[in-house]
Amino acid sequence: MAAATALVVANSVLAADDAVNNAFRVCKMIDNTGLFTAPCQVSSRKYSVTATIDLTTIDARKACTQITGVVASKGFHFPGADWTVQIRSPSSGDRSIVFCRLPK
């Protein structure tokens, strides 16, 4: 029983590590586009990938959907918590104008 409990704990730690590593991969993809106005950020506490781009809310929604589509096509998964992509505009300060859920 103790071994089974240890495996469950180890698997959840590995899953969390995979989610954080995948979040940094997503950030790198976002930063490599050269389209965003600030470096992408990962928050393992808020389970988010935050990108800043000068777009309208409608266009930001499209960008968010495209990001999550690419993430899914690359097979990146975010098990455990509900990870999101948060998109901010330069004028929105710390507030996101759009968010999309990343695949579990």
Image: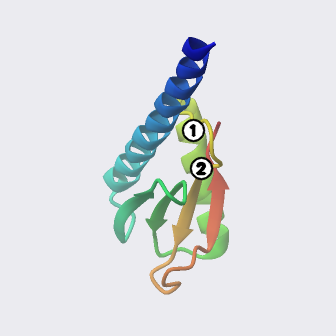
Give 44 or 61, whichever is nearer the viewer. Answer: 44
Dot 1 crowding, Cα within 10 Å, few <14, some 14–19, many 20+? many
Quarter of the rendering occupied by the C terminus: top right
Q: Residue at x 60, y 76 (%)?
A: 56
**Three-letter amino acid code at the position of disc 2:** Trp
- Residue 11 lies, with reference to residue 32, above or below; the image says above
| In this picture, residue 46 sits left or right of residue 32 | right
Q: Residue at x 36, y 53 (%)?
A: 33
Q: Which mark is residue 78?
A: 1
- Residue 43 percent across, percent down from the top left: 45, 58
- Residue 67 lies, with reference to residue 9, above or below; the image says below
- Residue 18 percent across, percent down from the top left: 46, 33
Mark 1 or mark 2: name the one nearer the start of the chain.
1
- Residue 64 percent across, percent down from the top left: 59, 56
Give 56 or 52, whichever is nearer the viewer. Answer: 52
Give 68 or 77, whichever is nearer the viewer. Answer: 77
What SS does tag 1 mark?
loop
User: Are circles 1 and 2 on residues that touch, CB within 8 Å?
Assistant: yes
What SS does tag 2 mark?
loop
Q: Which residue is mark 2?
A: 83
Q: Which mark is residue 56?
A: none
- Residue 52 percent across, percent down from the top left: 45, 70
Q: Residue at x 50, y 80 (%)?
A: 94
Quarter of image, res 77: top right
Q: Residue at x 63, y 62 (%)?
A: 99
**Three-letter amino acid code at the position of disc 1:** Phe
Colour scheme: rainbow
- Residue 70 lies, with reference to residue 43, above or below; the image says above
How far apart, in angstroms, are the residues tagged by discs 1 and 2? 6 Å
Quarter of the rendering occupied by the N terminus: top right
